[in-house]
Structure formats: C-alpha cells, structure tokens
Amino acid sequence: MKENRYIAERELDRQKEIAKALYAELVDRDLTFFVETFGCQMNVRDSETIKGELIEIGYSEAESKDEADLILFNTCCVRDHAEKRLMGNIGALKDLKDRKPGLIVGICGCMMQQEGMAKKLLKRFPHVSLIFGTNVLYRLPEMLQSVLNGERVAVTDRAEDAIAEGLPQMRDNPRSAFVNIMYGCDNFCSYCIVPYVRGRERSRSPKDIRDEIVSLTGSGITEITLLGQNVNSYGNDGAAGMTFAELLRYVSDVPGLKRLRFMSSHPKDLNEDVMQAIAQLPNVCHHVHLPVQSGNDEILKHMNRRYTRERYLSIIRRLRELVPDIEFTTDIIVGFPGETEEAFRDTMSLIDEVGFAAAFTFAYSPRQGTVAAKREDQIPEPVKKRRLRELNELQARKTVENNEKYIGFNGEVLVEGCDDRGDETMLYGKYQNFKMVYFPGDPDLLNRYVTVRVLKTNKNSLMGEMIDA
Ligand code: SAM
Ligand code: SF4
C-alpha cells in the first residue's frame, strides 16, 4: 500500500475517468496543443507529462502556436528576466485570441507557485484561462474540463506536495530520457527560489523508478538521466529505504541501459559511496555536473551551500583518482551580495584550477522571498556584468584547453543530431563523459552508437571522423 505522500489511486482514477469522457467528446474535433517550455530539465520532464495528458484527452501536438487550439507556457522563475519574457509572450497572444476566440491560453510551472503571481496574471491578461503550479499536473483533466465549460481556472495549491505515479507522458526523444528520482528541495541555498516553488524534498520509490526505466529501455531508449535538485540526498526523507549510491546499483543492471547519467549533484552530499558507484558500475557515465556556485568560503557560507572550497576540490581530486577520464561541469553565480573583488578572484582561481569541461554562469538575480534578496550589500549590475564577462572569457580558454587533450582520442558516441554544412552533413553526439563531437556521416546513424576519433578542435567543439559504425 502506498503511503499518503502519494496522490491516492482513487483520485488518479477519477482524473482518468474525466480524461476518458473528454476524449470521447473531443477526439473528432482535431484539436491541437502547443507547449512552450522554459527553464531546467525538471520543466522539460513536466512538459512531457502535460503533453501525454493532453493526448489522452484527445488533443494532438501542433507544429506552431498559430495553429494550436491550446497554448501553454511552462515557466521558470530562477532568475528575474524570465518574468519579463513571459509577460511579453502572453501579451503577444492577445491578437491571436481575438482572431480565434476558442483558443485556450494557459500558464503553468514554477512561476505560478510564486505568491500572488496567478492572481496578477489573471487580472492583467483576460485572455488567459488556465493557470496551474508544479504539483498538480495530475489534475489537468479536471482543470481543462472546467476551462472548456467556460470557467477561468487557477490551481496553485502548495499543500499538494505529493507524488503522482503513473501519469501519461509523451517522450520527444527516442534515444534518451529524463527520469525523476525525487521532487522538491530542502537545501534553501540563500539565493534560490526553488524550495519555495517546488516544495519539500520527496523521493520516489526505487521500484517505481526502476519500472519506469525498464519501460523506457523496452521502447528502445538506451540513455537515462536521473533527475533531482540534489540527487545525492535521494532517500534522505527516509521513505525510499535506499541511498543514491544504492539506487545507482539497483537500476544500473536494467537490460538495454547503456548509459546512466544523473543531475544535479550537490557537493555537500556527494560521498565516497557515490564515487565508488561511479567508478565501479560499467554504464554509469563518467561525467558529474557539480555546481560550485563560488570559489570563496565566505560567500559559500552566506549562500548556505554547506561545503568549503577545499571540500569541493577534494571531491574533484578523489573522483579523478578513481575515474581518470571523468569530466566535470558546473554552475557559477557571480555578484552574490557582498562578493568582493577578492572573493570573485577566488572563483576565477577555482575555475582555473579545476578545468571544467563547461560551466553555466549566471549573474546573481535577487528573488523575492529568499534570504539573499533581503541583504543590503547588493552588487551593482555593471560590476556583475563585468565579472560575468571575465568569468566567461576564462572558461572559454579552459574549454579550449580541455578540448585539446582529446586530439587523437577515440570512443563510442551516441548520435544525437545532424547539421547540414554546405555540401557536407555533419553528425554530432556525445562520448559517455559528456564531451560533444562533430563528424561527417549519414543521417541514418541518428540514435545509434558509433566510434569516432577526434582529429581537431574548433573553439567550443571537437571535430572527428567515424572509424566504426
Ligand atoms: N539544484 C541544482 C543545484 O543545486 O545545483 C540547481 C538548480 S537551479 C535551477 C540551477 C542554477 O541556477 C543554480 O545552480 C544556480 O547557479 C542558478 N541560480 C539559482 N538561483 C539563482 C539566482 N537567484 N541568481 C542567479 N543564478 C541562480
Ligand atoms: Fe536551489 Fe540549492 Fe536546492 Fe539547488 S540545492 S535547487 S540551488 S536551493
């Protein structure tokens, strides 16, 4: 029996019944949807569920917004420019709604969980009729039924921090899939809004995770990325009965699973057991996305990250000792309140010392309700911009350095796409340790594994030749 941290099966069945009734009513009307996703992999994964639900209700996917009968924006609110962008996007649909009165415009995702946001949007945009938060995706059939009956619906209940299993999904990618292992976050990094909008950390049961992976590999998917805001704290809520290292061992032998990835890792919880699992399990990929945020201990303390620069560097050293071909990527924030020039130099020196394969770099953006946003020692925008530019220049040099060590290397690549460049078709894909390589080849090789030798580097990318298909 499932405990009450799950949405009751009775309730899920009720939603299924509504979906069935809607399907019978709508299926002959050729209705289409367009879902636009902003933000991180969690949102991408949520959109797959939303699309699956809409298909179950009788919609199909439209090629563009102009053709769609239902347009839904799945929003992010990690940085503040997202809000301005969303307002622009919604405002721009007013004309389309005037021309197509039956059009349903909806907004969902993290931003909808922000205090007062739903109310503000409903007031400002009369053409928006559906708003829902991150934890009520399972209620989409019921919400849509009300909208189709002419109501305006906004469901952003925070009480619903529970897990809904078995929802439909439309997977876009035939080779690779995201699988949530947990939802929410308990870390409360002082700059971050995620714990406020996605709720408390809750882990899925190992069996549900494994069953989902079995079903995905059964449909031909060979690469799985386990998703969580901090995968290393999987099971800390006591409900899963397993740690993250144990989960890796538990799922890694699923037949057909060639590559097992995970993100994001929080340095404070990445322990020796996880490192050993990465080193020992043959299909766990040799890549860790390990956000450092800052290289300065004082700033790390104020960010509430709960590790020091030295602890971070010791993880890098230990993993390189255990797994020599491992690559690291990271997230960095510059211009956190109180960041002195000296503290920023510590971040620069850490970047120089580690040699990340890539870094996602951000200027600190105050988020209302977070601890850091209340601080008075905010850094002026021009200073943040200049630091971000310097940091990006340094990382660009480090990326080139990192690429150069691959010249002559050969290994297996999963082909992800192709690019027509004049008279040559270039395929691209990743080695297991996340390094991307471009090489000439036949588009029929898409989604297959081929062996590629690196011949040269081109600023950001590796260029190679296929030596075995
Ligand atoms: N849970 C992941 C972790 O801890 O690494 C990251 C989740 S967050 C959506 C992705 C990244 O956005 C963070 O690692 C951080 O670098 C950045 N970020 C979060 N809040 C931010 C803020 N207020 N301003 C600028 N960047 C921010
Ligand atoms: Fe945000 Fe920190 Fe949680 Fe990541 S670990 S989601 S940065 S609070």
Image (cartoon, rainbow, N blue to C red):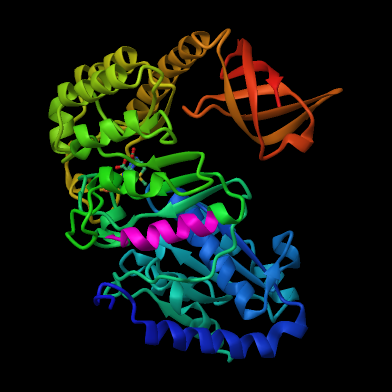
The residue shown at (53%, 89%) is 17
Q: Quadrant of the C terminus?
A: top right
The residue shown at (52%, 50%) is 177
The residue shown at (78%, 37%) is 444
Identify the image quadrant of residue 156: bottom left
108 displayed left or right of 30: left
Front position in the image: 281 or 320: 281
Q: Is residue 113 above or below residue 428?
A: below
102 displayed left or right of 383: right
Q: Is residue 210 above or below residue 133?
A: above
The answer to if 207 sits in the magenta stretch is yes
Q: Is residue 270 above or below residue 241?
A: above
Q: The magenta stretch spans which residues?
A: 203-216
The answer to if 239 sits in the magenta stretch is no
Q: Is residue 117 above or below residue 79?
A: below
Front position in the image: 215 or 365: 215
- Residue 366 point in image, percent of width and height: 29, 45
Q: Quadrant of the N terminus?
A: bottom left
- Residue 123 point in image, percent of width and height: 46, 75
Front position in the image: 152 or 416: 416
Identify the main secondary structure in magenta: helix
